[in-house]
Image: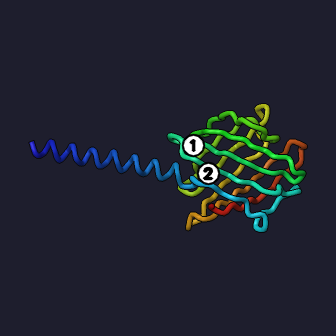
Amino acid sequence: MRIRQAILIVACLIVAGVGALVQAQNTAPVGTWKLNLAKSKYNPGPAPKSVILKIEAAGMGATTTVDAVAADGTTQRWVFTGNYDGKDVPITGNNPNADTAARKRVNSTTTETTYKKGGKITTVHTSVLSADGKTLTISAKGTDAQGRTVNNVQVYDRQ
């Protein structure tokens, strides 16, 4: 009887450990992030006036909410929820450069999100969480809605 109990306890610990590991991997960049304009570079410009990025755990993935004020003062708010499986999911709101997003995990601190508009890739964003968890750096490469080449580096500070 004791052997069965020991096996059951070990099995429960393994399941709990795997669940905790999966949750930790999914929540690494979870939080609210504010764009640090002084450390960010926008090519082409102009840079937005402000961006707040909110990432919330959602099952095996995350919900990303972006609230931005563009250089011309217009506001943008867009949201998507997706797993780290590389599958396209719809973006709701007013993102001028994309209507779907697909994210995948590169490693424990890096994710890649591919944005598309009308089925065509517009930009690919590589997000890297700093070792101390206080900075999220997103490198964006591709083409914007006007057909211009995009090569941005956005630096966000955890709030």
Q: Which of the 4 image quadrants contains residue 137?
A: bottom right
Q: Residues within 10 Å of mark 2 (few under 14, many from 20)?
A: some
Callout 1 touching callout 2 (CB < 8 Å): yes
Q: In terms of secondary structure, where does tag 2 sit? A: strand
Instruction: Return the residue at label 1.
Output: 84
Image side of residue 19 versus residue 74, left or right: left
Q: In terms of secondary structure, where does tag 1 sit? A: loop
111 and 20: which one is in front? 20
Query: Which residue is at the far left?
Result: 1
Image side of residue 119 versus residue 148, left or right: left
Q: Amino acid at mark 1?
A: Tyr
Residue at screen point 24% across, 48% down: 10
Residue 119 placement (x, y as % from top left): 76, 32
Instruction: Return the residue at label 2.
Output: 111
Q: Amino acid at mark 2?
A: Thr
Which mark is first along the chain, 2 or 1?
Answer: 1
Above or below residue 41? Residue 75 is: above
Residue 114 placement (x, y as % from top left): 70, 43
Residue at screen point 66% across, 57% down: 33
| Placement of the N terminus among the 4 image quadrants | top left
Residue 13 placement (x, y as % from top left): 29, 49
